[in-house]
Amino acid sequence: MNDRLIQILGIMVTAVYFTFIVFLYAAEPRSLAEVSTKAADTINNAATKGQVIIGTYQIDQEKFDAGLAAFRQDNFALARDQFQKADPEQRDARTQFYIAYSFYRQGWGRVSSDDELFKQSLEAVNRCSALDPNFKSKDQDLKLKTPAELRNELEEGLKVTASDFNPLKVFRERK
């Protein structure tokens, strides 16, 4: 019986040691202090990914609300930052829609639009559509309610057409 117990203990110690070595290679800590920090981060990330897999993932509602307040004050960079902190795994369609909308609003201009911000908005709106193909915003302050409407507006903004040179374009409204 003692031999069996010693074998089991040896296998367990070897497995733990192997796991520790793999962790060290993956995390690449530069000091012992980083080992504990990276271990905690790894555990937190694994927990979040586990929540996504089993369907219990929830956004950080406080950060989402802070992002929404910044969005309503036209502070789109802060709003995006808060939205991204609220949904670090990019698994919530509503949050991704607001991220896309904030890129759109910041990039929109009366004379011309910021193509780089519009492209980032398209990426976020595509994530939103992938998460929930039937998503529709319930926010009464938004003029574009669905990812399809927002995508259409973004794609039109990225095209260069003769209407881009229309001087009456300065009177158009942001949606």
Image (cartoon, helix red, strand yellow):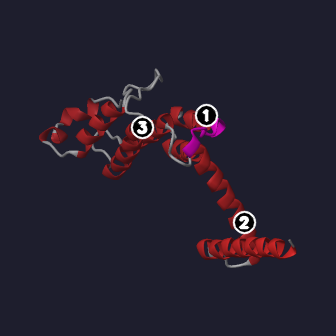
For marks 3 and 2, the one nearer the N-term is 2
- SS type, badge 2: helix
Q: Is residue 87 visible?
A: no
Q: Is residue 34 magenta?
A: no
Distance Cα–Cα, label 1 vs label 3: 15 Å
Q: Where is residue 165 drawn, in percent x and y?
A: 16, 41
Q: Identify the residue at image location x=46%, y=20%.
A: 140
Is 70 on the left-hand or right-hand side of 113? right
Badge 2 is on which residue?
37
- Range of residues picked out in magenta: 53-63
User: Local crowd at mark 2 within 10 Å, few (<14), some, or many (≥20)?
Assistant: few
Q: Is residue 124 visible?
A: yes
In the picture, residue 5 is in which quadrant?
bottom right
Q: Amino acid at mark 3?
A: Tyr
User: Local crowd at mark 1 within 10 Å, few (<14), some, or many (≥20)?
Assistant: some
Q: Identify the residue at image location x=19%, y=41%.
A: 164
State which mark lies toward you, 3 or 2: 2
Badge 1 is on which residue?
65
Foreground residue, 159 or 128?
128
Badge 3 is on which residue?
101
User: Local crowd at mark 3 within 10 Å, few (<14), some, or many (≥20)?
Assistant: many
Q: Amino acid at mark 2?
A: Thr
Q: Identify the residue at image location x=70%, y=65%.
A: 39
Vertical arrangement, residue 156 with respect to residue 39, above or below: above
Q: Where is residue 111 drawn, in percent x and y?
A: 27, 41
Foreground residue, 75 or 87?
87
In the picture, residue 129 is in which quadrant?
top left
